[in-house]
Amino acid sequence: QVQLQESGPGLVKPSQTLSLTCTVSGGSIRSGGYYWSWIRQHPGKGLEWIGHRYHSGDDDYNPSLKSRVTISVDTSKNQFSLKLTSVTAADTAVYYCARYYRNYERTWFDPWGQGILVTVSS
Amino acid sequence: SSELTQDPTVSVALGQTVRITCQGDSLRSYYASWYQQKPGQAPVLVIFDENNRPSGIPDRFSGSSSGNTASLTITGAQAEDEADYYCNSRDSSGHHAVFGGGTQLTVL
């Protein structure tokens, strides 16, 4: 079955860019109908959708983060990535990647990666 | 604040039935999905398309919806069901995904 695994630095300095990669195994990132998404969870808090992208380019982002976020898809590597610019301590969170299905009234995320804690600190 | 509202905490006696609710105007138009998250673990999808279970999810988990409220019901709660539960759907525009604030379930 499809599995996702996040990778990237666990520590980022304030004002710098957070960059994470999610590697998809057990299936193709070009699978029809699925978007590729990032979600984060601040320590002790709930889930926050960051954004998603389809392999052919259609994307969407949380309005509260849109000016700082880019999600890209690399079909040759079966990976997708997150870039979040100008980070502050408020961006410290566990970041999850997930496969996202959305079609008409249907919406769900499955599976999820194990998550990666990113701390923003000097 | 989230466009999907959940009670922060719910408790249930072992073996009893519990309902966790999620309210939001977008639920009149879009299905809810539900996720279970145990401490230190990633969320796991337990209900999608309002009332469908992925393979491997026990049949004591079920979903339903009425008006602007979606519900996750656990019939015969087990100790291992103690976790945080999140609902997910779209925002009021229908464009963006949104999660409820989460419900911490305690099994007594």
Image (cartoon, coloured by chain):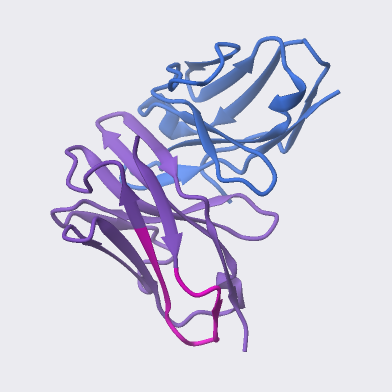
Chain colours: A purple, B blue
Quick check: is A21 in the magenta stretch? Answer: yes
Name the quadrant containing residue A62.
Answer: bottom left
Vertical placement of A87 versus A81: above or below? below
Name the quadrant containing residue B49.
Answer: top left
Q: Quadrant of the C terminus of chain B?
A: top right
Vertical placement of B18 versus A28: above or below? above
Q: Which residues are magenta?
A: A8-22
Instruction: Give the percent coordinates (x, y) of residue B44.
Output: 52, 36
Name the quadrant containing residue A117.
Answer: bottom right
Which residue occupies 59% across, 70% down? A92
Which residue occupies 70% across, 45% down? B39
Which residue occupies 29% across, 56% down? A60
Instruction: Give the percent coordinates (x, y) of residue A1.
Output: 35, 34
Number of numbered discs visible in the structure rendering? 0
Direction right: furthest residue = B108
Q: Nearer the viewer, residue B74 or B68?
A: B74
Which residue occupies 61% across, 16% down? B73
Quick check: is B75 in the magenta stretch? Answer: no
Q: Is residue A37 left or right of residue B14?
A: left
Q: Nearer the viewer, residue A113 or A86?
A: A113
Q: Nearer the viewer, residue A114 or A19?
A: A114
Instruction: Give the percent coordinates (x, y) of residue A33.
Output: 20, 37
Q: Nearer the viewer, residue A15 or A65?
A: A15
Q: Is residue A57 left or right of residue B25?
A: left
Instruction: Give the percent coordinates (x, y) of residue B29.
Output: 35, 27
Vertical placement of B79 versus A32: above or below? above
Q: Is residue B103 left or right of residue B59?
A: right
Vertical placement of B21 versus B26: above or below? above
Direction left: furthest residue = A56
